[in-house]
Each structure stands twice: as C-alpha cells, then as structure tokens.
Image (tube, rainbow, N blue to C red):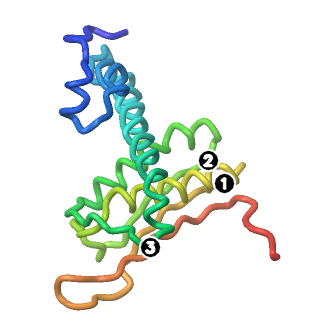
Amino acid sequence: MLVGLGTAATSQDAKAQGLPPYMAPIAGRTTATPADTATKDMLNTVLKSGEHLYTLINQVLDVSKIEAGAATLAETNLDLYTLLDELAEMFSLMAKQKDLRLIVESKPDVPKHVRVDAVKLRQVLINLLSNAFKFTRAGSIWLQVEKRRSIHDAECLLLFKVIDTGVGRGTR
C-alpha cells in the first residue's frame, strides 16, 4: 500500500532526472513513499529497470554509429561496487523466482572507483546476466570481477566473468 504519491510527476520532472517524458508516470509512482521496505525496494528495481530500458533504446539507436566505425566511449568515474550491488539487486528477484543462486563478487584488489563508459559496461553486464538467466534452469550464476594486471599506477585491466550452470553453447 502506498502512503502517498505526492505531486504527480510531469514530463519536466522526468527530463530533470535524465529520463524521457514517457517515463514520468513510472518515475512518479516509483519514487512515492511505500508503506513497507519490500515494496519500496521492488519499486526502485522497476525504476532502475525502466532507466536501463531507456538506455538500451538509445544504444540500439547508436548501432548505426558502430557500423560506421564512429562509436565513441563516454568515460566517466564510476563506483564499481555500487554498480555490482545494483546488478545483484536487479537480478535477485529473477534468481528467487527461478530458484537459482546469484553470486556477485569482486576480488579484494579490484578498485572501487574506475574510469569507464558506465552505460556500456552496465549494458554488457546486464546482457550477459540476462543470457545466463535465460539458459540456466538450476544451480548458480556468478558475476565475478578481478584485476588482471596493472598497466601503470593509475590504470589496470579488469576481467568480468559471468559463469553459470546452464546448458552452455554447443561444440559447433
């Protein structure tokens, strides 16, 4: 039960949050104050999933840039641990529904803050995790991050792995 919706969200509110106008109703309802924490968590997951859907739509529109060899990276500073927590939260309901164990872990030497195209990294990890859930009927799915090597003091290579107990690819 929602305690109160507050003011109705407008397309201007959505735009101020970096969302497209058509997401205003979703943003308005998911930022309401729910009566319990579980409902609030579910609504936050809906909002984050909606934001990701919007990002995916924009990425599809950028395919022509990739095909033309004109794709660019929009590097920003990212709290990697927060991204991993968000992914764990986003996929936890699916894991529960499919009775799967979801494990998201990073090795101790993985830096908390990285400079990366956060949108593209998030998109790739969500795609890999979605595929793992799609083809895994029992067992576990792991998202692991490890530091492969340091390039110099300010840069390192990170390895992201999604491992699952699903059917896997054929040997073609």
Question: Residue flagged by tag 2: what amino acid is it?
Answer: Leu
Residue 150: % across, % down: 28, 88
Mark before the other along the chain sequence, 3 or 1: 3
Question: Would residue 157 appear left or right of 154 to someone viewing this image?
Answer: right
Distance between mark 3 and mark 1 Cα atoms: 40 Å
Residue highlighted by disc 1: 139
Is any part of residue 37 visible from this angle?
no
Circles 3, 2 touching at the beta carbon (< 8 Å): no
Question: Residue flagged by tag 1: what amino acid is it?
Answer: Gly
For the point 33% across and 54% down, the residue is 83
Residue 79: % across, % down: 23, 59
For the point 58% across and 65% down, the residue is 163
The image quarter containing residue 14 is top left
Circles 3, 1 touching at the beta carbon (< 8 Å): no
Residue highlighted by disc 3: 69
Residue 23: % across, % down: 36, 27
Residue highlighted by disc 2: 100
